[in-house]
Amino acid sequence: MSEHGTLLEVQDLKQYFDINMGFFRSRPLKAVDGVSFSIRKGETLGLVGESGCGKTTVGRSILHLYQPTGGKVIYDGKEIGDRASLKEFRKKATMVFQDPYSSLNPRMTVSDIVAEPLDVHGLCKNKAERNDRVLELLGYVGLNSEHASRYAHEFSGGQRQRIGIARALAVNPEFIVCDEPVSALDVSIQAQVINMFDELQEQLGLTYLFIAHDLLVVRHISDRIAVMYLGKMVELADAEEIYRRPLHPYSRSLLSAVPLPDPKKARANKRIMLSGDIPSPLNAPSGCPFRTRCPHASDVCAGSMPEFKEVETGHFVACHRLAEIG
Amino acid sequence: MLNANKPFSLHLDPKLFEPATEEEKAYISRMRPSSTFFRDGCKRLLKNKVATVSMILILLITLAVIILPMVWPYSYESMLGVRPGKPVDSSYNNLAPFTWGKTELKRMEEGEKLFPHIFGTDGHGRDYFIRVVYGARISLAVGFFASIIVLLIGMVIGSVAGYCGGKVDIIIMRIVDIIYSLPDMLVIILLAVVLGKTLNVEGTILEKIGSNVISMFIVFGLLYWVSMARLIRGQILSLREQEYVLSSQATGAKGGWIIRKHLLPNCISVIIISTALQIPNAIFTESFLSFMGLGVNAPMPSLGSLASEALNGITSYTYRLVIPAVVICLIVLSLNLFGDGLRDAFDPKLNA
């Protein structure tokens, strides 16, 4: 496979959850509704959007932690679905979780936590091999052998997140879903962990799906960025491109909210304020999901869902009124 | 002070900026020994005086009921007045504490040393002390084994219901609700009657304890697991939403692995505590049933049947009722207090 070959392809992924509305009545909550994208080998795709827009669900559905309601996940040319393919897939795709406090079992030592994927897949023949592998993994994330026999509560947030990363690396994966891995850490530790992600990518040739809501962090680490709104993808482009020239009105508003370090520029920067709140995904608006808050919305938007199409090379947008708003 | 040698100088002492030697580094980065949840809990338990005393008492009683029957010169079933080929010597019946029967007195006059009947003898001339010890042995054994049966069944069913959720959970919990609504005493009495006839325990080890006790175990297995199952299901329902469970699922771990490695270790404190509190419950049930005449088979004593027999001579031999009652109280009270101490020491929500 070439350097820019596609590693993971997601086609029209749908994830609905049934919400009980009393006796024998349930309604689907469309957490993710028809999302398509692909990730190239060795790149980092940043996934941004506000809380509750389905970013985390996309990550979890790709790994089949929830059985997707519809759509396909194609990894390395093979569709993931049946047991055998899923078993192989689990050795190649892992996940780093958001909350370093709840993602480590408080009753297990660090070495047991890190070695769990090895034990589950039966990758180590004996104790010595397992031990060596654990120390190697801890070495990758800047921890040492002294830490291996300790319990998770004895570590700081940043160290715990490193343990979580070491666990994700245990099976020698190619692809890691990073579900807001730094949002629970304070800023100086965020930088350390982000840089570690970068270094590990270089060393081990990893591919990331990096879910976050901190736009500056995403810009730093991502090659391409996807923007989600209410379970749908509204824009996908190269990281620099999307920061320079966001096309979708939602992306524009989102990016205008990024704080700028230069006060002069910050004063010149016009924030595009959105009116209203994000609608509940239980009763999403018809047509374009963003139309209730979009300053450019018109009758077309209420009629049908805009197609997610490539307007320039590598720049995908879903908006009816792209031509008018320029 | 910036410079130790020149107190009024503002120049910094360059010595303060020398890099630390390896020894100094090792001194600073030395870590305290890792303390586990279990060790912390034990420490807290030992600080609780009531619980510690109860624990020691339980251990002493347990040791006593194991060791004493081995070394005691009298047996719980031999009637001292009955000798083969001789008429029954009724002087052995209803002996007061620290007195002896006729033949024993004769032997002592000849210079033999005999062990005293500390609590006297019962109406059939059997040493009462060893009968109380045996009764306590039966009670404790019933308590421990019944709790273990309850623990095993409740743990398996509760964790499956909690982890699987959905339809499995609904079905299991409805069964639990049905069992909850059955009157347990009635079921025990009915089963004891039926099993006594159908269960053929003659000639096996089980014969000694009798079909009544076996039916009691069966009833415990059938009925009493429900509260344990509910408790564990509730714990697991809240634990399975934790991200470490999700992480384990993401590595491809199966349900059994997740329950064993992640869920049960995290509710072990609740399990220990409710098991400890289940034991006195079982002992009470056993005593009650034996008192009603549905417990162990004669001549095997149990604390309840001893108390029941003592009722006949309550005016003349009051101590025979008091002794087993006090022993039951001691066992149940100390187990309850120990269970409370365990809960205080191990329940993270209480000492937050």
Image (tube, coloured by chain):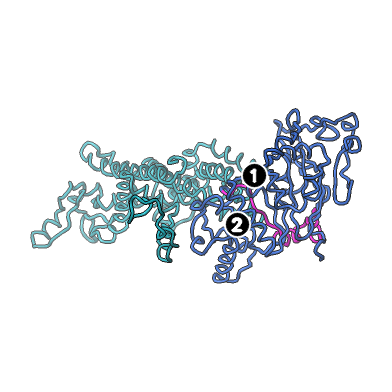
Chain colours: A blue, B cyan
Tell whether position B20 is magenta: no
Residue A92 is drawn in which quadrant?
bottom right
Looking at the image, which is closer to me, A156 or B128? A156
| Span shown in magenta | A72-100
- The disc placed on residue B16 is none
Do discs 1 and 2 share a chain? Answer: yes
Crowdedness of circle 2 by 10 Å Cα count: few (<14), some, many (20+)?
A: few
Q: Position of residue A105 (x, y in %)?
A: 55, 52
Marks 1/2 in contact by CB < 8 Å: the verdict is: no
> Could you tell me the amino acid type at mark 1?
Gly
Side (left or right) of B190 relative to A103: left
Looking at the image, which is closer to me, B136 or B37? B37
Q: Position of residue B293 (x, y in %)?
A: 38, 43
Residue A24 is drawn in which quadrant?
top right
Residue B344 seen in the figure:
yes
Does A102 sit above or below residue B185?
Answer: below
Q: Which residue is mark 2?
A: B257
Residue at x 54% of width, y 44% of height: B235
Q: Which residue is mark 1?
A: B165
Residue B294 seen in the figure:
no
- Give the spatial CA distance, label 1 vs label 2: 16 Å
> Could you tell me the amino acid type at mark 2?
Trp
Helix, strand, or loop for circle 2? helix
Does A196 sit above or below residue A251?
Answer: below
Residue at x 66% of width, y 63% of height: A171
Q: Position of residue A157 (x, y in %)?
A: 55, 49
Looking at the image, which is closer to me, B295 or B276? B276
Tell whether position A86 is magenta: yes
Residue at x 29% of width, y 38% of height: B311
Helix, strand, or loop for circle 1? loop
